[in-house]
Amino acid sequence: MTISVRRVVAAALLGATLAGCSGGTGPAETRTAASRKPPAPGTSPKAAAPAEPAEPPARPPTMAPGPAGLTPVFERAAGTTDKTVALTFDADMTADQGPRAAAGERFDNPQLIAALRSLKVPSTVFMTGRWAEEYPDQARAIGTDPNFEIANHSYSHHAFKSPCYGLPALDGAAARADVDRAFEAFRTAGARNVVPYFRFPGGCYDDAALRALSTARVTAVQWDVVSGDAFAKDPGPVAQQVLDGVKPGSVVVMHCTRSAAPTTEQAIRRIVPELRARGYRFVKVSELIGR
């Protein structure tokens, strides 16, 4: 074997060894059989076209602005005959309830979230930024689970219109900042399944509130079925009220706060199988708006 032949063989062996040690798992290091073919004669390997980047995830659907550019409001998928229903859960916590949480009051409800997972119910959680800060591990777990999407319920759970059930009120500039602060709290917690929807604390709003949020590019989401789970002691009436009120395209408002809605999980365990028996399919709010 001549010296030049030995050099060719050694180079080939070295190249095979390096290729076998690359071990990468990223898209640039994954090769199909076609991509492993040698380049055509006269073609440099460097001239091959780069892999196309993955398309970014589509932005969840929103509604067009209302009259005079006001934030649009969605209550239910009106006019549909498709038996779909969205169960939504408000994770309420005000900006000044930290001492109560430190004293042992529970504003979370992991048993409810576990029940929704076990029942395979896609759901939308309207979360306050303060809740996400108090329970960052849960916010991240909910916000990375494809079964859920997280929507904005303000940072402070203060009112955007007064009077509103005795809640402290925010003016226009403070209201807009409060929404931004909540989204930032979700990002800090590591939640990814965050949608551009907003629910007014207490459900209270007027044109001034819709105008204050007009630059936030969100859709305000209300409801057409009130569960009555807040402060309820018996899950039976809660379940019955939901079952009596649901129609195709409904949005049901419930709560994910154990101290203020202790019977919600039990009510869900009756509501879900009954509605499925009636032919209903559970969806997230984004699917209803997308229709």
Image (tube, rainbow, N blue to C red):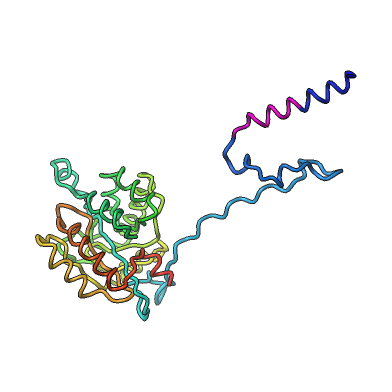
- Identify the residue at horizontal 84%, vertical 21% (top origin): 6
Question: Which residue is situated farthest in the left direction here?
Answer: 233
Quadrant where the image shows the N terminus? top right
Decide: is 193 above or below 273.
above
Q: Is residue 113 magenta?
A: no
Where does the magenta region start and end? 13-23
Question: Which residue is situated farthest in the right direction here?
Answer: 2
Left or right: where 88 falls relative to 216 = left
- Identify the residue at horizontal 21%, vertical 72% (top origin): 243
Left or right: where 177 falls relative to 44 = left
> Magenta region, mostly helix, strand or loop?
helix
Q: How far across and down, in percent of the image, does residue 31 sit?
A: 65, 43
- Identify the residue at horizontal 50%, vertical 56% (top origin): 57
Instruction: Using the image as rendered, state which of residue 8 and residue 60 is in the foreground.
Output: 8
Q: How far across and down, in percent of the image, does residue 205 sit?
A: 27, 69
Decide: is 173 above or below 74.
above
Instruction: Using the image as rendered, state which of residue 51 and residue 205 is in the foreground.
Output: 51
Decide: is 174 above or below 9.
below
